[in-house]
Image (cartoon, rainbow, N blue to C red):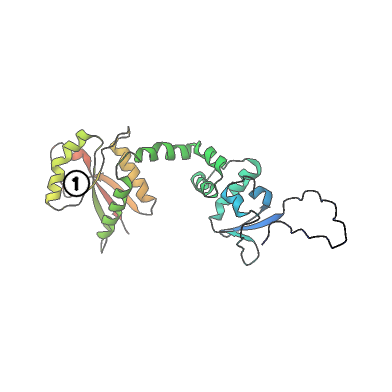
Amino acid sequence: MSLTPTSRSPRPGRAAPPASPPTISPVVELNVGGEFYTTTVGTLRKLPGSKLADMFSSSAKACTDAEGRFFIDRPGIYFGAILDYLRSGQLPKQHIPEVYREAQFYEIKPLVKLLEDMPQIFGEQVARKQFLLRVPGYSENLELMVRLARAEAVAARCSNVLVCAVRTEEDAAHCAESLRVLEADKRLVVKFGPWKAAPAIRDLLDSVRMDIEVQGYQVAYEHCSKKTFQPKSGAYEYFYTFQFTWW
């Protein structure tokens, strides 16, 4: 489907008609993930070089739904905020993380930068995520915790995963003997740290809980009980049990 009208060549022997004045951007109807919007091509192309503008360039192959609307296979509920910014520079007041994700997808770089200055995104992107980048193997440890919990879930209401969190090399030294005991007993423990950043062990554990919960799991943590494991003297404060509840 063409986004601009096709010009016709004049008939032989006839003078070409005078140039017509610039045409107004045609109105287009969009189906974004099942949500319907009406806007103009000019609005969609407002930021040349963005993915959204490229989608509606004259050379792009359009994907349409059964009603002839341009179709974009993205979450439609947040696309209105993208259009509001392109139309008037208006920033969203809700669903900030979701709009931020969509602005990144459509490569609306000025909006991405403005959203990164908002507290919701600044705190997550600049503070928390930058801290977690300083925790060695953080993402891999999250995946390991989920795998261990799921492996113990058969015919059980809850699964427990033992975690050791150490902020400094000195903390790690306090835990070394307890970790050797666990290894000798063939007990699995997920170890986080040490890391070179200001946040404390509780901050790390809260981040672990948040990032597991966002995957849809119900999880809580506490100091490991004597029934679970009895750390050596001076190491108790570094061992925690994460409990996954399945039903």
Which residue occupies 66% across, 57% down?
29
Q: Which residue appears farthest toward the right when viewing the image? A: 14
Residue 48, image x, y percentages: 62, 46
The quadrant of the image that shows the N terminus is bottom right
Position of 229 compared to 152: left or right? left
Which residue occupies 55% across, 42% down?
109
Q: Which residue appears farthest toward the bottom when viewing the image? A: 66
Residue 126, image x, y percentages: 43, 37
The 10 Å Cα crowd at callout 1, few under 14, some 14 to 19, many 20 or more, is few
Count of marks overlaid on the render? 1
Q: Which residue appears farthest toward the front when viewing the image? A: 13
Residue 2 higher or lower than 23, as above or below: below
Residue 129 higher or lower than 62, as above or below: above
Whether residue 171 is visible, yes or no, is yes
Q: Which residue is mark 1?
A: 225
Which quadrant of the structure image shows residue 234?
top left
**SS for callout 1:** loop
Q: Nearer the viewer, residue 50 or 122?
A: 50
Residue 133, image x, y percentages: 35, 40
Residue 221, image x, y percentages: 28, 46
The quadrant of the image that shows the C terminus is bottom left
Which residue occupies 66% across, 48% down?
43
Give the residue type at disc 1.
Ser
Position of 151 compared to 98: left or right? left
Whether residue 231 is visible, yes or no, is no
Position of 53 compared to 75: left or right? right
Q: Nearer the viewer, residue 145 or 223?
A: 145
Which quadrant of the structure image shows residue 89?
top right
